Image (spheres, rainbow, N blue to C red):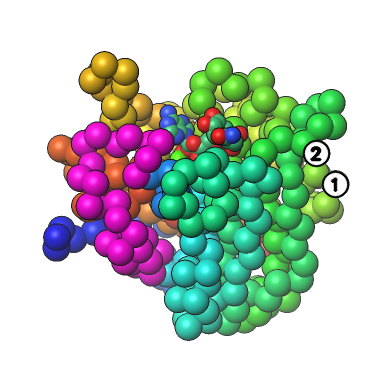
Amino acid sequence: NSTPLLVRDFTRPYQSSGGNAKPETSDGVIRVMQWNLLAQGLCQTSDAFILCPHEALDWEFRQHHLLEELLTYQASIYCLQEVDHFDFFKANLSKLGFEGVFYPKPDSPCLYEPNNDGPDGCAVFWNTAQLQLVSQDSFVLCRTSGSETNQVAIMCRFKVALGPHKGKEFVCATTHLKAKKHHAVLRGEQGLDLEQTLREKTGGLPLVLCGDFNADPDETVVQLIKNSQLNLVSAYTLLSPSQDEPHFTTWKVRGGKKGSQEESVHTIDYLFFSRDKFQCEQLLEMPTEDQLRPNFLPSYAYPSDHLSLAADFKFID
Ligand code: NDP
Ligand code: CA
């Protein structure tokens, strides 16, 4: 199948001081991409995406579109979830000067699927020409009681290696919180653990925090991050005058019991940044509903049920 990948443009935030014109220079820009790229181990079994042809989810086909999506937008940092083919991405991205870290979930659901490709987890890749890794912390998120959960986070401290901000340090963190609506309390506790750890370990450095939070914008965990002393703002709220999140970051149709169909349209992926340390220069536009029709996500035109988010940041001097 030769369906081309869905390709999107970058756009300026609403009311950006530069208007709609493209920024004059990309000097000093750090581009971060957030993407739950859909574990291979889950996509052809438990996920049951009934509008997506089974062959569109074959690894032999899908791996090319996954890589194409990453490379099309040339990020400085890729924050990824549901990675169960870390070695594949590492082998390909390392040829382009990227290094990466991977942290699997303690008991990945992928491992219980037939012919699985190993556990899924979070991964971070960075462009070594632009960024030097100073240190990294990968950890299992805990409940308020202190007991470990099955979800993880990665925190990387980087030093800018070139350009006008050479030598500046910042932190980029990513996570994938527990899925399903009825686990809001658990997600709240995971968010609290993550937020406390970030406050302890970032030491006031500029921060980008992104992930699949599995929580709609009004859920406790999202409010907790938005109201945190970390002083973060959600990048994609800058796209609209009302400062609402986008209408969706995932749009899928699953097969239910007795042939029923369950449509799931949610905004659950976020890209937060330090509002007083970074300025957001551009954002990767979200597609329209029409662009996703008729198959929604995933499809031959897009390899995951989650859309990637990407933003260009500049340090505020
Ligand atoms: P998580 O919520 O972290 O992970 C569940 C994964 O399944 C996520 O990647 C999620 O994707 C995806 N998912 C969400 N909704 C659905 C859905 N309706 N259908 C299919 N997949 C979905 O949970 P845990 O890692 O804590 O694992 C819990 C689940 O994993 C259990 O419900 C069980 O099914 C399975 N499991 C089974 C084990 C066993 O057989 N003994 C052991 C461990 C796990 P997204 O974030 O994109 O929504
Ligand atoms: Ca998933």
Quick one: 161 or 190, which is closer to the camera? 190
Q: Quadrant of the C terminus?
A: bottom right
Neighbourhood count class around disc 1 (C-alpha, 10 Å): few under 14, some 14–19, many 20 upward = few
Q: Residue furthest front?
A: 114
**Residue 173 appears in view:** no
Q: Is residue 242 visible?
A: yes
Q: Is residue 202 left or right of residue 190?
A: right
Q: For the residues labelled 1 and 2, say whether their Cβ atoms are less than 8 Å apart.
A: yes
Classify 10 Å Cα crowding around label 2: few (below 14), some (14-19), many (20 and above).
some
* Residue for point 57% across, 82% down: 129
Q: Position of residue 217 (x, y in %)?
A: 51, 27
Please give the name of the residue rendered at 73% of the width and 76% of the height, measured from the top-left corner.
Answer: 167
Q: Which mark is residue 59?
A: none
Pick the front one: 84 or 65: 84
Residue that carries the numbered disc 1 in the rendered image? 200
Examine the residues drawn in magenta and state their main secondary structure: helix
Q: Is mark 1 within 8 Å of ligand 1?
A: no
Identity, as a three-letter code, of the amino acid under mark 1:
Glu
Magenta stretch containing residue 40, yes or no? Answer: no
What stretch of residues is rendered in magenta? 44-72
What secondary structure is found at the residue carrying circle 1? helix
Which disc number belongs to residue 196? 2
Task: Find residue 111 and report its horizontal and vertical position in percent.
Answer: 55, 47
Q: Residue at x 40, y 64 (%)?
A: 70
Residue type at tag 2: Gln
Magenta residue check for 57:
yes
Q: Nearer the viewer, residue 142 or 288?
A: 142
